[in-house]
Amino acid sequence: MSKIEKVLASGKTHTTRNSAGNTSRGHNGNLDIELSSPGSTTPAHVFTAVQPHPKAEQLFAGAWSACYIAAVGLAAQQMKVTLPTNTAVDIEVDLGQTGAAYFLQARLTLSVPGLSHEVATELAHNADAICPYSKATRGNIDVAINVLTA
């Protein structure tokens, strides 16, 4: 994998879990999506965008964060861990350039207030192993996984 020398654009999302599904919001207010999980009886994605339109990097981050937070729920079930109600994931995807070549890179931050850092880190990596977006990007782009427990 090549490291990005110059970031050209970034997309950031904050995704939270709730009883009705997951909610993903862009950091600058131009992306607001209510997401349903596979097999859910709730309606499919409801998308609201305000000007300016979200960037491709933000849409990718939103889709990835929805998948990842669902994987966090599955990993927590497998580990017999009760997730805090304010569990969230922030994903930032950068489009960048090294020389004449273009690349992506990403940062995932799982926030699970109240869990021990050790359990939260294991949860984050187990979710990464489950999430199809994480699998698709593994080895293809530089990805950093961070955990917040406070």
Image: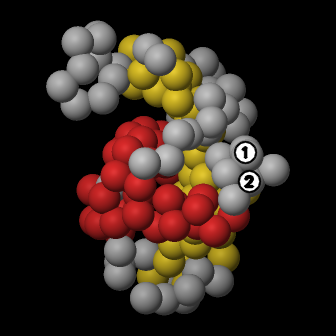
Q: Residue at x 73, y 46 (%)?
A: 114
**Where 73 falls versus 34 (above or below)?**
below
Residue furthest out toward the right: 150
Q: Secondary structure at mark 2?
A: loop
Q: Which circle's residue, 1 or 2, is located before the other in the chain?
A: 1
Q: Amino acid at mark 1?
A: Pro
Colour basis: secondary structure
Categorize mark 2 by other alpha carbons within 10 Å: few (<14), some (14-19), many (20+).
Answer: some
Residue 85 appears at what percent x and percent y? Answer: 62, 29
Can the viewer see residue 10 in this picture?
Answer: no
**Where 21 falls versus 3 (above or below)?**
above
> Residue 17 or 132: which is nearer the viewer?
17
> Residue 92 or 9: which is nearer the viewer?
92
Q: Residue at x 65, y 47 (%)?
A: 112
Q: Residue at x 48, y 89 (%)?
A: 2
Label annotation for residue 149: 2
Can the viewer see residue 123 in this picture?
Answer: yes
Q: Secondary structure at mark 1?
A: loop
Residue 27 appears at what percent x and percent y? Answer: 69, 37
Whether residues under marks 1 and 2 lie with C-beta atoms below 8 angstroms apart, the answer is yes
Q: Residue at x 41, y 55 (%)?
A: 79
According to the picture, the residue beneath numbered tag 1 turns out to be 113
Residue 45 appears at what percent x and percent y? Answer: 34, 20
Report whether 118 appears left or right of 42.
right
**Where 20 falls versus 1 (above or below)?**
above
> Residue 88 or 56: which is nearer the viewer?
88
Measure how far apart labels 1 and 2 are at the Cα level: 4 Å
Label annotation for residue 7: none
Q: Amino acid at mark 2?
A: Thr
Q: How many marks?
A: 2
Residue 49 appears at what percent x and percent y? Answer: 53, 20
